[in-house]
Amino acid sequence: MTEAEARDIIVARFGEAKARQIDNFVDLVREENSAQNLIAPSTIETIWTRHVLDSAQLMFHVEHFGKSWLDIGTGGGFPGIIVAILLDGATTMVEPRRRRAEFLQRSVDQLGIEQAVVLATKVEAVSDTFDIISARAVASVEKLLQAAGRCATPETRWVLPRGRLEAEQLVSLRRDESRLFHVKHSTTDPESSILIVEPNKGTAR
């Protein structure tokens, strides 16, 4: 997939105006990356496929699941800032590293993103609850569900990009009968997956 093709997917789903706002954020990331390592330098030239679309695809799985989103460990803004631009609702980004949190706040301010909050803290300090929770390559799934459990409601859907998810990992996760675990293929990387976690309400899937 080319960078232009990745951008075209965003335009088709969300419109040209949103894509232009993401263009502006990409410019901010490129500039800031020389001061702090927001993304791997080797991925700068493929930022739309490796980071933007990789973030936006999470929204394909939660389009009808709520209006409040928590992104844990937002780092350089992926997926948090991308979600904040595209979501018709409120986005909260949790990033404990001060310099990265400051960059996220500057990005929110400069891009004029409404309903976006940046918290320079760990998720354990967050007490609000959210309809959707994401975390891109943060901790193990089990540790993440425990650390952020207070932020979930009985209706919360977790959208967790992972690398290769081995069968034994899924078997281990499914021992938790209070939740359902679904694996979706990544649009941007055939070797990666997206783990969808939702409450088990006792209904057949």
Image (cartoon, rainbow, N blue to C red):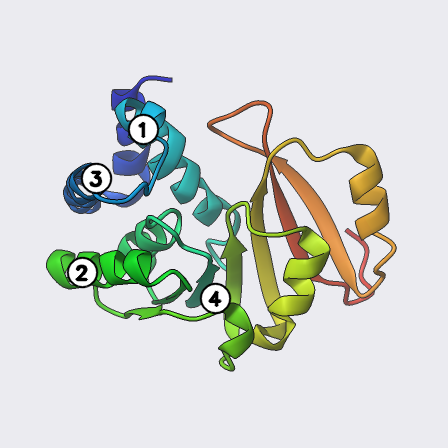
Residue type, label 2: Arg
Residue sitting farthest toward the front: 35
Does 23 sit above or below residue 178? above
Frontmost of labels 3 and 2 is 2
Q: Are marks 4 and 2 in contact (CB under 8 Å)?
A: no
Q: Alpha carbon of mark 3 to alpha carbon of mark 1: how far? A: 13 Å
Question: In terms of sequence position, does the residue under pointer 3 or pointer 1 come before the other?
Answer: 3
Query: Which residue position holds label 2?
Result: 106
Q: Alpha carbon of mark 4 to alpha carbon of mark 1: how far? A: 35 Å
Residue 193 on image: x %, y %: 61, 35
| Residue under the image location 49 percent in, 29 percent down | 187
Residue 6 seen: no
Label 2 packing within 10 angstroms: few (<14), some (14-19), many (20+): some
Residue 194 on image: x %, y %: 59, 41
Query: Which residue position holds label 4?
Result: 66
Frontmost of labels 4 and 3 is 3
Question: In terms of sequence position, does the residue under pointer 4 or pointer 2 come before the other?
Answer: 4
Q: Alpha carbon of mark 3 to alpha carbon of mark 2: how far? A: 13 Å
Question: In terms of sequence position, does the residue under pointer 4 or pointer 3 come before the other?
Answer: 3
Residue type, label 4: Gly
